[in-house]
Image (tube, rainbow, N blue to C red):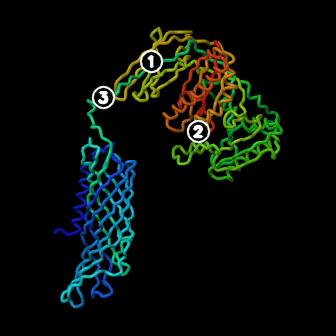
Amino acid sequence: MLPINKLIKKSIAACLLMVIAYTTAQAQNTQPTWWFGVSGAANFNFYDGTTQRLNDNLIVPAAFHKGTGIRPYGSVLVEYRPLGILGVSLNVAYDGRGGKFKEVVAPCNCPADLEVNASYIAIEPSLRLGIPKTGLYFFAGPRVAFNINNSFEYTQLKQPNTNANLSNINKTIFSGQAGVGYDFLVSSPKSATKIDLSPFVSYQPYFGQDPRSIESWSMTTVRVGIALKFGKGSKAVAKQTPSSVALPVREVVFTVRAPISIPAKRQVSETLPLRNSVFFDDGSSDIPVRYVMLSTSQASSFREHELQSEQSVSTTGRSSRQLNVYHNILNILGDRLRSNPDAVITLTGASGRGIVDGKAMAESIKRYLVVNFGIDGNRITTVGRIKPVVASEQPGGNKELVLLRAGDRRVDIESSSPALLLEVGGGMMKPVQIVATQVDPMDSQVILNVDGAKDLLQSWSVDITDDKGISQHYGPYTTDQQGIAGTHIVGARPEGDYKITMIGITKSGLSVKKESSVHLVRNDNVVVKGYRYSILFDFDKSNAIASYEKFLTGTVAASIIDGSTVIIHGHTDIIGEEDHNMKLSQQRAAEVQTILEHALVASGKTHVKFETLGFGEDASHAPFDNSLPEERFYNRTVIVDIIPIK
């Protein structure tokens, strides 16, 4: 007979070899959530400590110390695997912990043996951690055992044998276990009834496993066994080889939207919303240097209307021109407070470092307004918070926290005075009216739509060839939509015919080619009295558009004359998944169009053309960069360009 240590090693090795041999088996995607079954195992028990007083009637002459034994284990079990990775299990079992102590010699030079037959009813709940795409799992949990047998047999040479029960037995034992197993699916993959055969090994250390309340007998157990589990799942579909798989046919669709006339530049009157927040650098309660700070003499002569005259040329979206207006927010606020002596404001500072730090940020703004603009300090209330009322970081979030927290470290400006703040959604500060000249405005773009690019193509590019055979190459791109400035295509030519060839590479490596053509005409005349409006959103919100409905219907729609073209383009910042941001920008833009359409129909304007696009976080079309929190906030926007009749 093999020594018990070697037998344990061979049993564990056999289980591990079975696991290794089947690690390539694939888990079925129709596995049941609930499993029921039975298990059987051998408990390899190891004794240590001292045992000499067997009961009140028998104290043996020589103490026993070491011992071993193999006893049966059997259970009924249930498992719950809701996520495939995490789960729980419960075993209710007969648990044999008997064994034989190593022979000792009594003082009479008489060999003596002791065999105990301890056994329990055990309840063993466990947390189960499965390894994806394999049957391998780990488990660990507590063990509660109730003693049902405590008999022993003591033999000593020249003495009669003693069969009795041990005294001072702990009737209830609280301990723990940890182990590893492997589920082998033995039923047919097509069968709805699933059967698993699961060898396992577990280890129960001596902690908490003292069988008796006297002396120091301790017990450690290694369990090696196998479980048979049954579950009910949905019927699986047999896998096919790639050559026989019938994939749904979806074709890449290529379309081009081009302007009839390309305006090289446009002068617009822009209603620029002012975000009612000042963003602070981490670790400092001083106003950041990027905000325009005036001396007392400069502040006394500052007037908001100075920012309305054009100072620089704007790009298709925004530029440093618009950001400079925002960075004068404290000077604009000081001018408005000075011009409206009855108005009062509340400055709410939010800091993850604590309420005191948040209030210190608010106090630094108050100090600037009081000292430099001469505003009565009694008109300004300061409050400290840990998070702003409308926070970007949400409970449980764990992605891009640095960017989110930078946006939440700010001072929000609140007031009930319409001279300071205008209810254009979320208490935004009353916007500033500015005049700007746009180079390559949005309606000058040639928009390329490749429906299916995201799902079907690795990348795609375009070759644009004019009627003289001169070709221009653009790309590669990976999104479904891309815009190219019309002025880049026509160059110095007044007009021309262009063939646009889209060449894509599918994810399987095949080439896809699509063609279209456009006629482009360059118009270098400045179109006067175009209008631009912007709607700003809170982080990851599209339904906040409802708070802008009055502004859209009463102000924006009123600026649209019959026959105009309205270009609506949605954007997001760079926080979040690219696909999600694209859908979010499209939802925001579509919602704005719906509100404007209803308002125009109600006012009898029925000849208005809409061009609505969503660009997501696309950096080539983003209104601003994304390096500063205020830039990211301004990129959460829908911009409405109103182009009058040409």
Specify the amino acid type for callout 1: Asp
> Who is closer to the viewer here, 236 or 252?
236
Q: Nearer the viewer, mark 3 or mark 1?
A: 3
Give the residue at the far left of this rendering. Answer: 1
For the residue pair 81 and 537, the one nearer the viewer reads as 81
Q: Within the image, what quadrant is residue 501 found in?
A: top left
Pick the front one: 474 or 271: 271
Residue 198 locus on image (x, y percent): 27, 54
- In the rendered structure, which disc, 2 or 3, sits on the residue that comes first in sequence? 3
- Residue 136 position, x and y percent, is 31, 52
Look at the picture and state if 485 lies above or below 401.
Answer: above
For mark 2, does the 10 Å Cα neighbourhood hold few (<14), some (14 to 19), or many (20 or more) residues?
some
Give residue 216's quadrant in the image. Answer: bottom left
430 vs 176: above or below: above
Image coordinates of residue 480 in percent, x first then y, are: 47, 26
Q: Are marks 1 and 2 in contact (CB under 8 Å)?
A: no
User: Which residue position holds label 3?
Assistant: 246
Residue pointed to by mark 2: 539
Query: Looking at the image, is mark 2 or mark 3 nearer the viewer?
Result: 3
Q: Nearer the viewer, residue 452 or 81?
A: 81
In this rendering, would 501 be left or right of 7?
A: right
Report helix, strand or loop for mark 1. Answer: strand
Amino acid type assigned to the residue bearing label 2 in the image: Phe
Query: Under tag 3, what secondary structure?
Result: loop
Which quarter of the rendered picture does the C terminus lie within? top right
Q: Can you identify the residue that label 1 sits on?
A: 463
* Apparent side of residue 417 relative to residue 183 in the rendered image (left or right): right
Q: Between marks 3 and 1, how big is the CA–CA gap?
A: 33 Å
Give the residue displayed 53% in from the left and 43% down from the top: 400
Picture residue at 76% right of the left edge, 28% below the top: 306
